Image (spheres, rainbow, N blue to C red):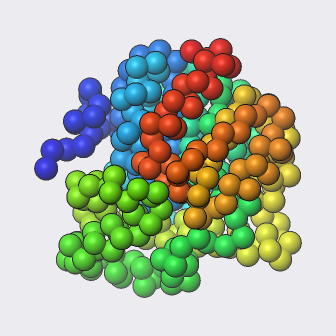
């Protein structure tokens, strides 16, 4: 099967070295296509750059589209020997932008990536030009999927053993079939997901050691955040919620009308908390808008950037 990076990006998969929050060098995989103002595509939990495959070409007609795998995901480095600090993604996003962009970019972010982007806009207002967030777990009260809950409750030592034995690789056909079933459940029209899609969605888990461990670690951090929010202990979720009024860059909130993980009412609530925002509900759209409603999503992004004089 053709290498996805080589097929999509003129220079294929490129790499960038940044310092993570602990000061260690880490290699980030990314691709870019198009010219003009920079536009960053930020994926969600358990995904990688491939989830933006239906947006890269359409948006690259207007922008220099940069698509990267966050540390621990996809083809980026997975430093399994050290534990992550909560909020590490925000600092790492800033360092990636500082390396790759010569002006504040548009950030388009889905799901957990949207939560990172909201916090980033609060902490680094000078590094963001426009913000688009899609189906964000900003008011989530629980992890939305049973597999997430299982990974969040399983000791990392057990996950590391499963990963080191390469069980996902050994049982790759079964793993892909389970993933296909679950990914189709977050799509309004499940038939849009092809067998090639399933192969690439599952690829980091079946082929790249360390992926399962890092995703489990991120889920455990997310579960602790939700628990601390519920018990009113200090947590990042409350911090982000409390400072939404401080995000002044033009922001587009996109939400699937039938999102089966985070309801559209969360999108309406988020919109009301932001001082310079527009809300657009995507009809016939579940949680995975980047795949299930890509045409509508791309059009909404382009229209928003035209309206806010970024094109």
Viewer-proximal residue, 113 or 103? 113
Residue 40 in picture, x, y percent from top left = 51, 33
Describe residue 2's horizontal placement relative to residue 95 as left or right: left
Residue at the (69%, 44%) spot, across then down: 118
Quadrant hosting residue 162: bottom left
Q: Is residue 37 above or below residue 195?
A: above
Can you say whether 26 is above or below 148 in the image?
above
Please name the residue shown 13% across and 50% down the image. Answer: 1
Q: In this rendering, is residue 250 above or below 219?
A: above
Furthest residue to the left? 1
Counting labels gives 0
Quadrant of the image for the C terminus? top right
Please state the horizontal and vertical placement of residue 2, each as a whole percent of the image.
Answer: 15, 44
In screen coordinates, is 171 left or right of 103?
Answer: left
Residue found at x 25% / y 77%: 174
Residue under the image location 23 percent in, 58 percent down: 195
Looking at this view, name the residue that lies furthest to the front: 284
Q: Position of residue 45 (x, y in %)?
A: 51, 59
Res. 100 visible in picture: yes
Report x, y in % for residue 201.
33, 57
Residue 209 falls in which quadrant of the image?
A: bottom left
In the rendered view, would you say 180 is above or below 126? below
Q: Is 199 situated left or right of 28 in this image?
A: left
The answer, for residue 73, to whether it is visible in the render is no
For this rendering, which residue is in front, 281 or 206?
Answer: 281
């Amino acid at each position: 099967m053709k290498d996805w990076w080589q097929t999509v990006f003129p220079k294929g998969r490129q790499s960038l070295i940044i310092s993570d929050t602990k000061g260690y060098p880490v290699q980030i995989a990314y691709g870019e296509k198009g010219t003009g103002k920079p536009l960053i595509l930020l994926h969600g939990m358990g995904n990688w750059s491939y989830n933006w495959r239906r947006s890269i070409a359409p948006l690259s007609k207007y922008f220099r589209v940069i698509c990267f795998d966050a540390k621990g995901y996809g083809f980026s480095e997975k430093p399994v020997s050290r534990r992550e600090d909560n909020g590490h993604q925000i600092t790492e996003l800033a360092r990636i932008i500082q390396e790759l962009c010569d002006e504040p970019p548009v950030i388009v972010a889905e799901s957990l990536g949207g939560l990172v982007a909201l916090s980033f806009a609060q902490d680094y207002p000078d590094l963001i030009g426009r913000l688009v967030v899609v189906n964000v777990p900003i008011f989530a009260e629980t992890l939305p999927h049973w597999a997430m809950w299982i990974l969040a409750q399983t000791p990392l030592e057990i996950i590391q053993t499963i990963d080191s034995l390469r069980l996902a690789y050994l049982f790759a056909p079964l793993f892909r079939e389970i993933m296909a079933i679950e990914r189709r459940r977050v799509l309004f029209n499940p038939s849009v997901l092809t067998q090639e899609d399933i192969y690439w969605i599952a690829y980091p888990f079946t082929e790249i050691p360390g992926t399962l461990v890092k995703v489990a670690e991120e889920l455990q951090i997310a579960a602790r955040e939700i628990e601390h929010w519920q018990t009113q202990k200090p947590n990042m979720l409350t911090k982000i919620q409390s400072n939404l009024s401080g995000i002044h860059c033009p922001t587009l909130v996109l939400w699937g009308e039938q999102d089966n993980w985070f309801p559209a009412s969360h999108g309406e609530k988020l919109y009301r908390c932001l001082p310079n925002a527009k809300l657009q509900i995507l009809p016939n759209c579940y949680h995975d808008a980047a795949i299930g409603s890509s045409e509508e999503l791309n059009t909404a992004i382009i229209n928003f950037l035209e309206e806010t004089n970024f094109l």
